[in-house]
Amino acid sequence: DPSDKYEFFMKSTHLEQMILHYQQINEKLGAIHHTIKKKKQSLSDLKNLLRHLQAQYYKTMEFKDLGQKVEKLKDELIWRKVKDIEEEMNPIIQNLSKITDSL
């Protein structure tokens, strides 16, 4: 009967469309899974880079602090040398003062 054949044809056509849609969905799903996997790997790489850069930053800050401490110690050393020289010079100045007073 032609109407049965037509009905069968329509059902078959929809079935083919459903199969095609199913395949397209599976392909898209596969692409999505692949993209997610790549993004996760990229995220992991970025986290590692962040840790590395943070470590470098902290080392840089430590060196900066050390540099400031070195400068402070240099200043202290210079002033200590000035004080030592003054202490060495005091007896000499006193002797000179006595000598000039006696002249």
Image (cartoon, grey):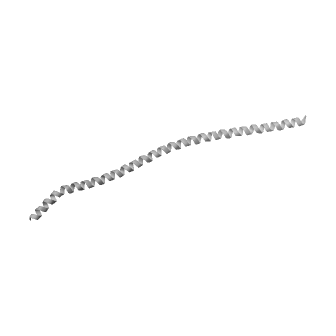
Q: Is residue 87 left or right of residue 66?
A: left
Residue at the image point whose x is 76% and y is 38% from the top: 18
Percent position of residue 2, x then y: 90, 36
Q: Is residue 10 left or right of residue 68?
A: right
Percent position of residue 102, x then y: 9, 64
Which image quadrant: the C terminus? bottom left
Which image quadrant is residue 9 in? Answer: top right
Residue at the image point whose x is 63% and y is 39% from the top: 33
Which of these two is toward me, 99 or 14? 99
Q: Across the whole image, how many numbered discs are drawn on residues?
A: 0
Q: Is residue 66 left or right of residue 91?
A: right
Q: Is residue 95 above or below residue 52?
A: below
Which image quadrant is residue 21 in? Answer: top right
Percent position of residue 11, x then y: 82, 37
Residue at the image point whose x is 60% and y is 39% from the top: 37
Q: Is residue 16 above or below residue 92?
A: above
Which image quadrant is residue 88 in? Answer: bottom left
Q: Is residue 54 left or right of residue 71?
A: right
Which of these two is toward me, 56 or 101? 101
Residue at the image point whose x is 58% and y is 42% from the top: 39
Question: Residue extending furthest right?
Answer: 1
